């Protein structure tokens, strides 16, 4: 009888419903944090699909491990391109799987989630994300621009009246956002990111070494040898294996750090042009604040060695990174659960009736 009473109590019902989630959904990865637990899901945004049946055979890390070695009946699908839904059915399947993994216990329903979206998201793209979240059994979905979320996650106070600039460098996009008083002052997203560096490395090895390598190998070269500035050890190298362009036979070459930096140089300069163009469109008072405060770099692309130094040199502003720039957005989204009034104000939801009417709705 005691267990039955517990089941029908408020706490009993809460045990069947998982707590609030913060979802950073991007072109290359999906990161989910659960309130009170921190980050519980950090998976690549990819789905392995059977070509014959059209069914998803693997999602996330399991699918990513197939990259370059997938069977002839399987293709890898990246359902999110430049931060927006390109394949609704696969996005729905992927998000459903990740949300299931994030839930604890026996719960099959989430009360609410805060999800990051790019600046300038259209109503059609917004509805697609809302529908995908609804299919994952999330009760209410609040959409917040990722620039604001990144700023909060990087330590910018929502009460700060002076402006702060966040440069979020993701896999497919670079988003520049300026925030003040917990609001977006300026935001601009451009389609250039760390994946473009991988492509540049692949192209350079093909042209200069006659070697075809896959995306995983290019990513390894970027992480191990890549730098946005002149590397400290230009001669440091790695042996890279791939397929010869002419003969088709397996072959290996040594690739130096200097060569990887040359390949990345064009992409890094494109990112700096995005930032400088954004700075040139700001109001004088905002520019004055940024002169004192500099730039905050977030996103996985900010982890490229020397990126902060390069942007500082190109913009004549200081540049810093939070402790874990990859998790800045999801950390900022999580903090909004403790600021319900602010969340109501900044949410980008088209359907305003989804928002709670009272500040205590999150307590």
Image (tube, rainbow, N blue to C red):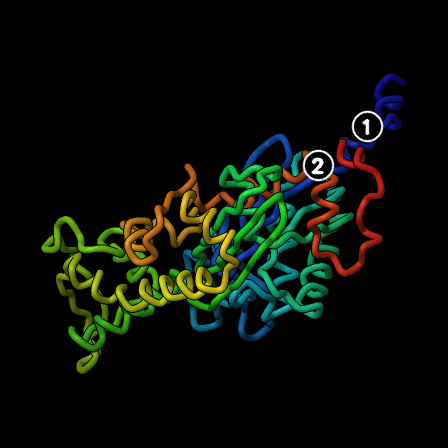
Residue at 60% over, 72% down? 53
Choose between 347 and 214: the one closer to the eye.
Answer: 347
Residue at 48% over, 50% down? 165
Q: Name the residue under label 1.
A: 12
Residue positioned most to the front: 284
Residue at 17% over, 52% down? 231
Q: What element carries label 2?
A: loop
Image: 43 above or below 276: above
**To which quarter of the image does residue 69 belong?**
bottom left
Choose between 8 and 229: the one closer to the eye.
Answer: 229
Residue 19: which numbered mark, if any? 2
Q: What element carries label 1?
A: helix
Label 1 Cα crowd, 10 Å radius (few <14 / some 14-19 / many 20+): some
**To which quarter of the image does residue 59 belong?**
bottom right
Q: In this view, does 155 lie to the left or right of 65?
A: right
**To which quarter of the image does residue 187 belong?**
bottom right
Residue at 57% over, 39% down? 160
């Amino acid at each position: 009888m005691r267990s039955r009473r517990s089941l029908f109590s408020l706490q009993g019902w809460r045990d069947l419903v998982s707590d609030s989630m913060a979802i950073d959904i991007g072109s290359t990865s999906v990161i989910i944090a659960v309130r009170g637990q921190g980050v519980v899901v950090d998976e690549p945004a990819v789905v392995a699909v059977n070509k014959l049946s059209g069914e998803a055979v693997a999602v996330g890390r399991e699918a990513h491990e197939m990259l370059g070695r997938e069977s002839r009946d399987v293709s890898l699908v990246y359902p999110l391109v430049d931060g927006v839904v390109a394949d609704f059915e696969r996005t729905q399947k992927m998000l459903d799987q990740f949300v299931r993994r994030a839930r604890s216990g026996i719960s099959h329903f989430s009360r609410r989630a805060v999800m990051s979206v790019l600046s300038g998201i259209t109503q059609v793209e917004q509805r697609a994300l809302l529908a995908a979240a609804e299919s994952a059994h999330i009760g209410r979905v609040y959409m917040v621009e990722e620039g604001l979320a990144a700023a909060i996650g990087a330590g910018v106070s929502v009460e700060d009246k002076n402006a702060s600039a966040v440069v979020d460098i993701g896999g497919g996009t670079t988003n520049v956002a300026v925030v003040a008083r917990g609001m977006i002052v300026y935001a601009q997203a451009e389609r250039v990111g760390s994946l473009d560096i991988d492509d540049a490395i692949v192209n350079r090895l093909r042209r200069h070494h006659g070697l075809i390598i896959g995306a995983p190998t290019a990513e390894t070269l970027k992480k191990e040898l890549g730098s946005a500035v002149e590397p400290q050890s230009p001669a440091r190298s790695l042996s890279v294996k791939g397929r010869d362009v002419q003969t088709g036979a397996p072959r290996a070459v040594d690739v130096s750090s200097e060569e990887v930096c040359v390949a990345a140089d064009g992409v890094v300069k494109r990112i700096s042009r995005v930032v400088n163009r954004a700075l040139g469109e700001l109001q004088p008072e905002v520019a004055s604040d940024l002169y004192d405060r500099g730039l905050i770099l977030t996103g996985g692309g900010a982890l490229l060695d020397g990126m902060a130094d390069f942007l500082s040199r190109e913009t004549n502003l200081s540049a810093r990174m939070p402790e874990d720039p990859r998790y800045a957005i999801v950390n900022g989204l999580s903090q909004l659960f403790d600021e319900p009034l602010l969340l109501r104000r900044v949410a980008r939801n088209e359907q305003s009736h989804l928002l709670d009417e009272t500040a205590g709705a999150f307590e």
